[in-house]
Image (cartoon, rainbow, N blue to C red):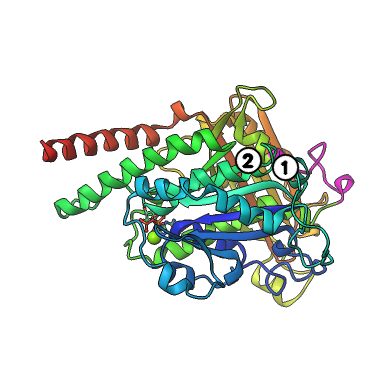
Amino acid sequence: MTYLFVGAGQAGGAIVDAIFEYTDDSMLGLFESTDISTLGRPLVFNSTMRDLQNLSNVPEEDQYGVAKDHGLIQGTEPGFEEMVTGGFGRNPVDADEVMSEHTDQLQAILDERFGSGGLDLDLEDEDENEDDGASAVENSDNIQFAFLFLGLGGGTGCGIGPHLAQQIKEFTDGSTHVVAVAVLPNTRGTGEDDSDETNAGRQAWNARYGLDRLEDAVDGIVLVDNQRISYLDSAGGEFGEYNEYVATAIHDMVAGPMLSSVDASQVDGVDTPDIDVRDIMTSLSFGIGNDESEPGYGAIGRSVTMTKSLTGYLMPFFGNREIDSAALSRLSASKQTLARADAGDAQKAISLVRAPSGNLTAGANSVEIGTVKEYLERSCSLNEVNIGVALSDRNLASVTTLLTYQREDLDRLDEIERAADAYEEETEELLT
Ligand SMILES: Nc1nc2c(ncn2[C@@H]2O[C@H](COP(=O)(O)OP(=O)(O)OP(=O)(O)O)[C@@H](O)[C@H]2O)c(=O)[nH]1
Ligand SMILES: [Mg+2]
């Protein structure tokens, strides 16, 4: 069983790369040898070789180029550099077309990597005599969950992303749950010149095009809105920090409870302080389990505080700090990755509290799980709130919160619709 972390295009690949930064020589070191790579596999697709070369934590064999004339090419293939050059230059319609011509190839790749005939995990023995012939039902054991990362404002990620989701589902006969983590473009523009405004309009158009297709292909959509960092000079360097923020939040929520679980009887304030990926999926969709289930729209946020003062770092047992649980929960909801969203409009929430064990068990310096829960329950209309708890091996307490909304409650998506309409009118005028 494995979780897939699929990146499409530059933004998608960069966020997946940031998630796989968490390997056992970094912060999870204390917890045996488990890290994100024991749980999930990265798989990255792009039409531009240079973006792929910028990845540090995704091996070449997990990279695929997408090219008009050659289809999908694995990063280790000879001639890769000559074949993967084009890019789709902000045009998702072209990217969509090329990808739709190569879905067979995608199935073959999934089968080779994750088919029951030869699951591509190191622990598996090489089994010579088994070839393919694995059914979709068997394949479903191998990919239970997939997370698809993509930017909606460009061409590649926006155009190929929905196909990737569809094909992963098809590979397992519909049993894999897929969550998209989709980057919304900054549609404000700086207003400095016309080309900038047109570009913002184009990206809004792309975002609408991509979202409409994604909705039909995935179970939930987490929005990462670049408008939230629009006050920064968008030269590109700032994406790094934003990507890390998103990667940490997703990593903690998905892997935290698995990699560093807490004994439930030790924690006050919740019945079962345990969440798993299935809970994330449930929290992110509406009407799960019946035929009319539809994806919800999520936004993620994370707040962190130190559990020790500086003296506490130097001398253990001294300098423990009190933790303001109410402030931590409020901040995690207000730092969500979506502009113009009000936590009070959310339908559901799922939250992961992470802290050293001394700050989780009852005592003066503990995070009050009950307080976090109460805060979220007050925000969410459906009163469906899930709280999980995980250990941290650093002197930090964090609350990571995923809030789920219905599309019609998000002003920001209306704003993108309007910008897309305006762009369409403008370009039609140019044509006539
Ligand atoms: N948050 C975030 N946004 C990014 C990053 N890289 C690009 N973006 C934004 O994501 C959107 C899509 O851009 P890209 O990911 O570069 O596009 P692409 O999928 O590679 O598609 P092409 O147009 O074919 O290059 C744009 O709005 C970019 O500003 C990133 O690392 N993080
Ligand atoms: Mg690109």
Q: Amino acid at mark 1?
A: Ala
Residue at 40% of width from left, 59% of height from top? 69
| 232 w.r.t. 313: above or below | above
Is disc 2 surrounded by few (<14), some (14 to 19) or many (20+) residues within 10 Å?
A: some
In-front residue for pair 49/37: 49
Q: Amino acid at mark 2?
A: Glu
- Range of the magenta residues? 263-279
Question: Residue 264 colored magenta?
Answer: yes
Side (left or right) of 135 relative to 237: right
Principal SS element in the magenta part?
Answer: loop
Q: Disc 1 vs disc 2: Cβ atoms closer than 8 Å?
A: yes
In-front residue for pair 80/242: 80
Residue 24 in percent (x, y) is at 72, 71
Side (left or right) of 106 relative to 100: right
Residue 400 seen from this side: yes
Question: Residue 111 colored magenta?
Answer: no
Local SS, label 2: helix
Q: Which residue is mark 1?
A: 136
* The residue at label 1 has a CB less than 8 Å from ligand 1: no
Q: Which residue is mark 2?
A: 170
